[in-house]
Image (tube, grey):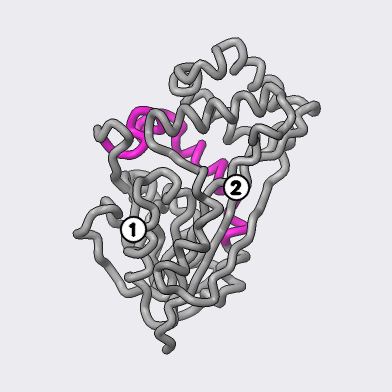
């Protein structure tokens, strides 16, 4: 999907997480290895299955899209992203790929039984307006499911090389591309404001283990975000190198950012 950063220049992440950079698809897949099981378990519990039409916002490399089609047996998935090269490389029956700006007034596909957006709203401005727009794409009886990161390296967390790096990362991403996780705990309220019913939420916190997918994901993310992180003044290159070593050691006991998932139903029943 497209979306301007704080400076109003370019698409989201263009200066930090560029799809054309070598290994960016592998970095995205490390996140998928960490979170896909939790995502799919929640979607199955919500009843997503045969006959459902689905909209996948920020589809990335298409892992959730393919699992919706292959495991859940949904009828179709419209997979949308700011750059669709990774989706186009792995087509499957039932998947339609669309490169689009989801913040645009012209973005109005649908309706869908499921609208799903994972790690998308936190990177875009006006989350309230976007939630309202996505809720408007639901078919009668449809469900909107949104997931975003929850920062657990708050001021009260122990000071370690890991927590220092994470704090610098969140500040650097906010300064450079507009990422803001501070309002993520308010996602359920936004769903209710959009008129959805039976709103609920849950948090999944993956463990940080040496060599695990989530630890490798953060290591790769820090390397790509290094200029933005050091520009904050919260960490320098030596400190980031120390954090990378710490992240890969058995001594790392920090909590990975959690994934808060919130959902709500279109009150117009089938």
Instruction: Give 110 or 52, whichever is nearer the viewer.
Output: 110
Residue 227 lies, with reference to residue 12, above or below; the image says above
Q: Residues within 10 Å of mark 1 (few under 14, many from 20)?
A: few
Helix, strand or loop at disc 2? helix
Residue 114 spot, x, y in % from top left: 44, 71
For mark 2, what is the residue? 33
Q: Is residue 16 magenta?
A: yes
Where residue 183 appears, as percent x and y from the top left, is 50, 48
Left or right: where 254 falls relative to 50: right
Q: Which element is circle 1 on? A: helix
Spatial CA span between label 2 and label 1? 30 Å
Residue 256 location (% of width, % of height): 66, 40
Callout 2: few (<14), some (14-19), or many (20+) C-alpha neighbours within 10 Å? some
Q: Depth check: give the residue in front, 198 or 91.
A: 198
> Can residue 228 be seen from the camera position used here?
yes
Query: Residue 148: within the magenta?
Result: no
Foreground disc of the pair 2, 1: 1
Task: Identify residue for label 1.
Answer: 129
**Residue at left 71%, top 33%?**
157
Pointer 2 or 1: first along the chain: 2
In the figure, is residue 254 to the left or right of 122? Answer: right
Q: Find residue 94 and report its image quarter.
A: bottom left
Image quarter (top left, top right, bottom left or bottom right) of the C terminus? bottom left
Side of 263 where 205 appears, left or right: right
In this picture, which residue range is highlighted in magenta?
Answer: 10-39
Residue at 59% x, 50% y: name it: 259
Q: Please provide percent x and percent y for residue 167.
A: 58, 29
């Amino acid at each position: 999907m497209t979306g301007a950063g704080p400076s109003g220049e370019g698409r989201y992440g263009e200066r930090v997480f560029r799809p054309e950079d070598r290994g960016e698809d592998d970095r995205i897949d490390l996140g998928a290895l960490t979170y896909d099981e939790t995502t799919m378990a929640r979607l199955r519990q919500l009843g997503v299955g045969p006959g459902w039409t689905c909209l996948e916002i920020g589809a990335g490399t298409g892992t959730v899209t393919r699992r919706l089609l292959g495991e859940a047996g949904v009828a179709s998935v419209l997979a949308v992203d700011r750059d669709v090269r990774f989706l186009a490389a792995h087509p499957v029956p039932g998947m339609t790929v669309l490169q689009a700006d989801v913040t645009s007034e012209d973005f109005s596909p649908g309706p869908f039984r499921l609208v799903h957006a994972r790690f998308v709203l936190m990177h875009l401005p006006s989350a309230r307006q976007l939630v309202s727009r996505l809720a408007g794409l639901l078919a009668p009886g449809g469900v909107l499911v949104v997931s975003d990161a929850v920062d657990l390296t708050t001021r009260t967390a122990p000071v370690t090389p890991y927590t220092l790096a994470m704090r610098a990362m969140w500040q650097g991403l906010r300064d450079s591309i507009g990422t803001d996780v501070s309002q993520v705990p308010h996602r359920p309220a936004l769903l209710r404001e959009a008129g959805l019913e039976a709103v609920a939420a849950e948090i999944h916190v993956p463990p940080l283990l040496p060599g695990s997918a989530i630890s490798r994901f953060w290591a790769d993310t820090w390397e790509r975000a290094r200029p933005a992180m050091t520009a904050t003044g919260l960490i320098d290159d030596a400190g980031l190198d120390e954090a990378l070593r710490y992240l890969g050691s058995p001594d790392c006991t920090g909590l990975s950012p959690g994934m808060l998932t919130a959902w709500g139903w279109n009150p117009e029943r089938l």
